[in-house]
Image (cartoon, coloured by chain):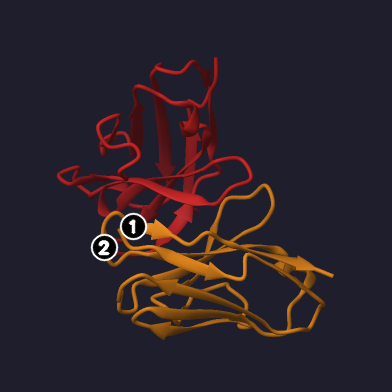
Amino acid sequence: EVRLVESGGVVVQPGGSLRLSCAASGFAFDDYTMLWVRQAPGKGLEWVSLISWDGGSTYYAGSVKGRFTISRDNSKDSLYLQMNSLRTEDTAFYYCAKAYSIGAPFDSWGQGTLVTVSS
Amino acid sequence: EIVLTQSPDFQSVTPKEKVTITCRASQSIGNSLHWYQQKPDQSPKLLIKYASQSISGVPSRFSGSGSGTDFTLTINSLEAEDAAAYYCHQSSSLPQTFGGGTKVEIK
């Protein structure tokens, strides 16, 4: 069974930093593109970032470029999102998801972790 | 950035009715358009891929059509368990984007 389990969501002050993790199991992690999607409470989905199977290619939404860094450790079947210079508008549930390739649909999602940016 | 415009934003429907949700892209995306269902307090689930391809385990009452800039998700004979938000997603170009969502309520 495919499992994606996010962790690391907490309350943080504006300007602060946070690292999210996503532990994967039940599939060949290093065969898949991985990504982060976020959803502000009561709002729609926003694509955040994507990383290729080998970590060699990374892409970001304009709203987080320069502040967030996506990475992966294929030896640990884990995906990460380093979030710096956090803003109140970054408050959201953060989901990790997998896709067979960069242009493929997101076929499995985690349950999400809540990041709250507030003073 | 490709903008996806979904309509309607909200639809209240009686069981067994047919539901049609549209998604329009700001430029041609071929068939790189996917649909997701998100039930309350759950994570999204892939419903339809590449505009019209079915997903294993998804009821056959869900179907998709379209190409280029105009796409449609159809739910034939709506059931109570279909109460959810529905989102389109384009993977044609980066940054990938989602539509604003359509909330389907059961009357």
Q: Position of residue A97 (x, y in %)?
A: 42, 50
Q: Amino acid at mark 2?
A: Ser
Q: Position of residue A17 (x, y in %)?
A: 38, 19
Quadrant housing residue A31: bottom left
Q: Are marks 2 and 1 in contact (CB under 8 Å)?
A: yes
Look at the image and give the colour of chain A: red
Q: Residue at x 37, y 83 (%)?
A: B67
Q: Residue at x 29, y 54 (%)?
A: B95
Q: Amino acid at mark 1?
A: Gln
SS under mark 1: loop
* Apparent side of residue B103 relative to residue B80 in the rendered image (left or right): left
The residue pinned by badge 1 equals B96
Q: Nearer the viewer, residue B41 or A85?
A: A85
| Quadrant (top left, top right, bottom left, bottom right) of the C terminus of chain B | bottom right
Q: CA distance from mark 2 to mark 1?
A: 6 Å
Q: Crowding at label 1, few (<14), some or many (≥20) Cα neighbours within 10 Å? A: many
Q: Chain of mark 1?
A: B
* Apparent side of residue B27 relative to residue B44 in the rendered image (left or right): left
Look at the image and give the colour of chain B: orange
The residue pinned by badge 2 equals B93
SS under mark 2: loop
